Image (tube, rainbow, N blue to C red):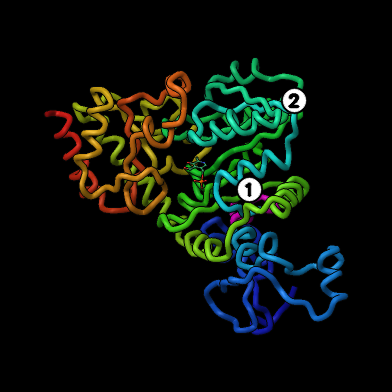
């Protein structure tokens, strides 16, 4: 294809074939307006106008492509969708109002009453509640199994099983799933294999290369990277995404144009941020393992981690989240958290600022005591999402926590 740059206000997809994820993060999906702005345009409009009643009818019937209404067509949102789809190597993405809305939309669009889901126990607490409390009301049954116990996955399969759902690495214990094995199990049983890729992002892990059918994102985390907006995305093949898109058009948990614009800006720096997060997290995990007040550190980049080899095969970095148990009970974990000054006490993760939280009473606080116990969420567990501040300064702050334990 030949073209003159000045006549083209977008980069043809063919020009981005074979480029690295770092380049896609900056370049994929941008559509320029007639003003030829360099940064992405933002379209804060709820609806779009037509030249005639006939054109409006053609848009609504689908005979003519184009924008209609921002619940389901908005150019800024579409730019975000195109970029994250390109980075994951999927056909198409559908942006949602949150990560939870991405999971909800996937279930509502692709499952029905009577279907069965197998979900790993080590998922974000609200994902567990969504399946266990709300999806169950509509006749969807979910069995929870250990992420790493392949025989448990095999025995949980039923004739009605239609979806296997995982996070890898898991939140907050950083367990790592064998995606190739789980994908084979899903395919053999005509079920969809869905991977929440929130912890790694496409910069560190590309689940389609290991057989995933659908990828879920909470864009709220690393894709934004600066803790500004809530959003999500579902990525997958065209036929499945058409269904997810149809659900969004009918039900409305849509991403706003402003949030899509923030996520586009976030994606531009995602590759360099992820590398900085990984470097700091590995350094801290190694250091924390040597501290007398710490019982155990959970981070897949540690040689002591049971799935270290698997993580190294599936991921190009070990991620920015780690957790650890302190010697003591809940009071000790809270004392550690309360002693920090620089680190933010907040449940969000994936921010350039380091954050600390007590999963048992925050992100996983709504789980029953039995579910917490089987998911390994103990009272003395602390999770850190390691930011990109100087690692020396983060250590100084964590030393305050360690000193509180010693008291
Ligand atoms: C792994 C994972 N998936 C999904 C979600 C839900 O995303 P959101 O808060 O954007 O709804 C979270 C939120 O913390 C998460 O950690």
Observer-nearest of 403 and 256: 256
C-beta proximity under 8 Å, tags 1 and 2: no
Query: Was residue 85 drawn as part of the magenta stretch in this picture?
Result: yes
Residue numbers of the magenta segment:
84-93
Residue 98 seen in the figure = yes
Q: Where is residue 70 in the image (x, y as percent from the top left)?
A: 66, 64
Q: Which mark is residue 234?
A: 1
Instruction: Give the vertical position of 52 relative to 222 (above or below).
Output: below
Q: Which mark is residue 40?
A: none
Q: Where is residue 52 in the image (x, y as percent from the top left)?
A: 83, 79
**Quadrant in the rendering for residue 119:** top right
Observer-nearest of 197 and 103: 103
Q: Give SS at disc 2.
A: loop
Residue 305 is left or right of residue 133, and the answer is: left
Q: Residue at x 87, y 66 (%)?
A: 63
Observer-nearest of 340 and 195: 340
Q: Where is residue 214 in the image (x, y as percent from the top left)?
A: 66, 42
**Quadrant in the rendering for residue 346:** top left
Q: Residue at x 43, y 40 (%)?
A: 318
Q: Which residue is drawn at 32% across and 33% down?
A: 382
Residue 319 is left or right of residue 389, and the answer is: right
Instruction: Classify mark 2: residues with Cα within 10 Å, few (<14), some (14-19) or many (20+).
Output: some
Residue 26 seen in the figure = no
Disc 1 to disc 2, C-alpha distance: 22 Å
- Closer mark to the observer between disc 1 and disc 2: 1
Q: Give SS at disc 1.
A: strand
Identify residue for label 2.
189
Instruction: Classify mark 1: residues with Cα within 10 Å, few (<14), some (14-19) or many (20+).
Output: many
Asked whether mark 1 and ligand 1 are closer than 8 Å, the reply comes as: no
């Amino acid at each position: 294809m030949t073209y003159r740059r000045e006549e083209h206000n977008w980069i043809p997809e063919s020009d981005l074939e074979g480029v690295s994820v770092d380049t896609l993060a900056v370049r994929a999906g941008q559509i320029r307006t007639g003003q030829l702005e360099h940064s992405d345009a933002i379209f804060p409009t709820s609806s779009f106008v037509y030249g005639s009643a006939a054109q409006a009818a053609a848009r609504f019937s689908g005979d003519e492509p184009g924008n209609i209404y921002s619940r389901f067509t908005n150019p800024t949102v579409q730019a975000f969708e195109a970029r994250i789809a390109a980075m994951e190597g999927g056909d198409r993405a559908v942006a949602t109002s949150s990560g939870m809305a991405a999971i909800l939309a996937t279930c509502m669009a692709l499952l029905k009453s009577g279907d069965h889901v197998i979900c790993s126990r080590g998922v974000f607490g609200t994902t567990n509640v969504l399946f266990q409390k709300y999806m169950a009301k509509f006749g969807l049954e979910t069995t929870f199994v250990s992420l790493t116990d392949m025989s448990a996955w095999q025995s949980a399969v039923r004739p009605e099983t239609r979806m296997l759902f995982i996070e890898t690495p898991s939140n907050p214990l950083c367990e790592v799933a064998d995606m190739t094995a789980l994908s084979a199990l899903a395919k053999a049983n005509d079920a969809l294999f869905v991977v929440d890729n929130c912890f790694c992002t496409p910069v560190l892990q590309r689940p389609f290369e290991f057989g995933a059918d659908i990828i879920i994102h909470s864009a709220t985390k690393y894709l934004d990277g600066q803790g500004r907006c809530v959003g999500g995305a579902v990525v997958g093949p065209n036929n499945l995404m058409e269904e997810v898109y149809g659900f969004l058009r009918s039900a409305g948990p849509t991403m706003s144009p402003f949030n899509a614009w923030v996520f586009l800006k976030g994606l531009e720096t995602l590759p360099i941020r992820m590398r900085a997060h990984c470097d700091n997290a590995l350094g801290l995990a190694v250091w924390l393992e040597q501290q007398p007040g710490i019982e155990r550190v959970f981070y897949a980049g540690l040689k002591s981690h049971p799935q270290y080899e698997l993580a190294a095969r599936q991921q190009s970095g070990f991620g920015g989240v780690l957790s650890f148990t302190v010697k003591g009970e809940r009071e000790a974990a809270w004392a550690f958290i309360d002693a920090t000054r620089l680190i933010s006490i907040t449940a969000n993760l994936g921010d350039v600022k380091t954050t600390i939280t007590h999963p048992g009473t925050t992100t996983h606080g709504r789980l029953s005591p039995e579910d917490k116990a089987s998911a390994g969420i103990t009272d003395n567990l602390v999770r850190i999402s390691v930011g990109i501040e100087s690692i020396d300064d983060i250590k100084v702050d964590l030393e305050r926590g360690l000193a509180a334990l010693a008291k």
